[in-house]
Amino acid sequence: MIKIAPSILSADFANLERDIRRVSSADWLHIDVMDGCFVPNLTVGVPVVKSIHQCTDMFLDVHLMIEKPVRYIEAFAKAGASLLSVHLEADGPGGIAQALRLMDGCGVRKAVALRPITSPKAILPYLEQLDMVLVMTVEPGFGGQSFMTSQLDTICEVRSLIRQYNPACRLEVDGGINRDTARRVISAGADVLVAGSAVYGAADPAMAISALRG
């Protein structure tokens, strides 16, 4: 079943609780955490995730675009994250492995994320233990970017690896998702779609969510 995860990066932060309720028909809520170092942008941190958790019972899909994420796994888990994604490019293999072990100890689902420059095979040392792999179809850091069609091959390859080593693992795609690109990434193997402007820029977010599932 395809899951839709609206990204609050496109929400109105002056009315965040209202905008979370506007997408309550979605499956997950996607929260982009950026540190201004791993990516050239700053967004939200632990206190905002905690506040979001207090105002919704939605599944919180927290995407950590931060350097050395192992430092913050426990804090985000305690704040209410349901799943944490860490970028393979954000630390060495030992740091990534430690971050995933901490997720186990904290009881959150675990995922790794890939920038467009990263080979799909980079997930192999971790794949058998993952709940999800996140493939970026834009360079991480800012919302509203155009979909990189070259990443369709990456999605296909990641799906093939998942099928071979961990069929229960989900494949999430984030970046430039709209009704047209949604069909293409689903065909390539995605089963979780992150959408920001395609949902929050629509007159009727619930209808936009339904269309993406369609």
Image (tube, rainbow, N blue to C red):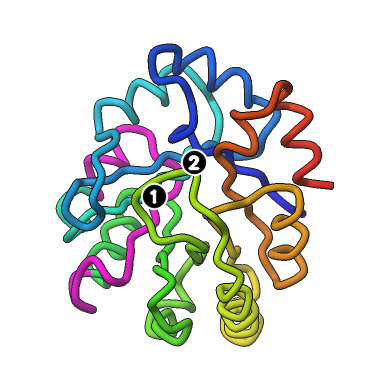
Q: Nearer the viewer, residue 41 or 107?
A: 41
Marks 1 & 2, CB-CB < 8 Å contact:
yes
Q: Position of residue 65 (x, y in %)?
A: 30, 53
Disc 1: CA contacts within 10 A as few (<14), some (14-19) or many (>=20): many
Question: Which residue: 45% across, 12% down?
Answer: 15
Would residue 209 be found to the left or right of residue 135 on screen? Answer: right
Q: Which residues are magenta?
A: 73-95
- Mark number for residue 120? none
Q: Secondary structure at mark 1?
A: strand
The amino acid type found where label 1 is placed reads His
Q: Quadrant of residue 188?
A: bottom right
Name the residue tied to disc 1: 63
Image position of 104 with respect to 31: above or below: below
Image position of 73 with respect to 185: above or below: above
Would residue 209 be found to the left or right of residue 47 on screen? Answer: right
| Magenta stretch: includes residue 86 | yes
The amino acid type found where label 2 is placed reads His
Question: Which residue: 39% across, 20% down?
Answer: 13
Name the residue tied to disc 2: 30
- Mark with earlier residue (1, 2): 2
Residue 204 visible? The answer is: yes
| Magenta stretch: includes residue 126 | no
Q: Position of residue 45 (x, y in %)?
A: 25, 35
Work out which residue is located at the far front of the displayed protein and give it: 146
Q: Position of residue 83 (x, y in %)?
A: 44, 49
Q: Nearer the viewer, residue 190 or 201?
A: 201
Q: Quadrant of residue 1?
A: bottom right
Q: Position of residue 3 (x, y in %)?
A: 68, 48
